[in-house]
């Protein structure tokens, strides 16, 4: 799903399932992380709809990289 914002940048929104597939995780893992305030940023629309910006997911994953000695 895409949404064009006022700055004419394209923001790609992912459902929880799509974000989980993008990260090769289960949607239950993302839901669990969200309940613990960990994982990528998300927004909740209404009572049940959760969306993730693809850039937020990618940035979060990038920051999980650990240096190997």
Image (spheres, rainbow, N blue to C red):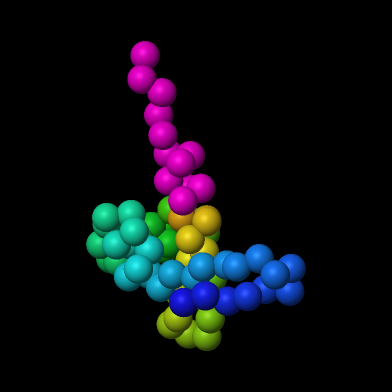
Q: Does the magenta stretch include residue 63?
A: yes
Q: Which residue is drawn at 53% across and 81% down?
A: 45
Does residue 26 sit above or below 64 in this rendering? below
Magenta segment: 58-69
**Horizontal and vertical percent position of residue 6:** 73, 74
User: Residue sitting at 40 percent across and 29 percent down?
Assistant: 66
Question: In the image, what residue occupies the spot 44% across and 69% down?
Answer: 14
- Residue 19 in picture, x, y percent from top left: 38, 63
The residue most toward the front is 8
Q: Which of 15 and 45 is in front in this view?
A: 15
Q: In this view, does 56 lie above or below 61?
A: below
Taking the magenta stretch, the answer to whether it contains residue 65 is yes
Give the residue displayed 58% in from the left and 76% down from the top: 3
User: Disc count in the image?
Assistant: 0
Quadrant occupied by the C terminus: top left
Residue 39 placement (x, y as % from top left): 43, 53
User: Does 58 sit above or below residue 42?
Assistant: above
* Quarter of the rendering containing residue 32: bottom left
């Amino acid at each position: 799903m895409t949404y064009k914002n006022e700055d004419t940048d394209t923001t790609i929104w992912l459902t929880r399932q799509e974000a989980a597939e993008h990260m090769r995780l289960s949607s239950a893992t993302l839901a669990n992380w969200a309940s613990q305030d960990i994982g990528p940023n998300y927004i909740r629309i209404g009572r049940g709809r959760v969306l993730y910006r693809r850039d937020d997911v990618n940035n979060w994953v990038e920051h999980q990289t650990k240096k190997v000695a």
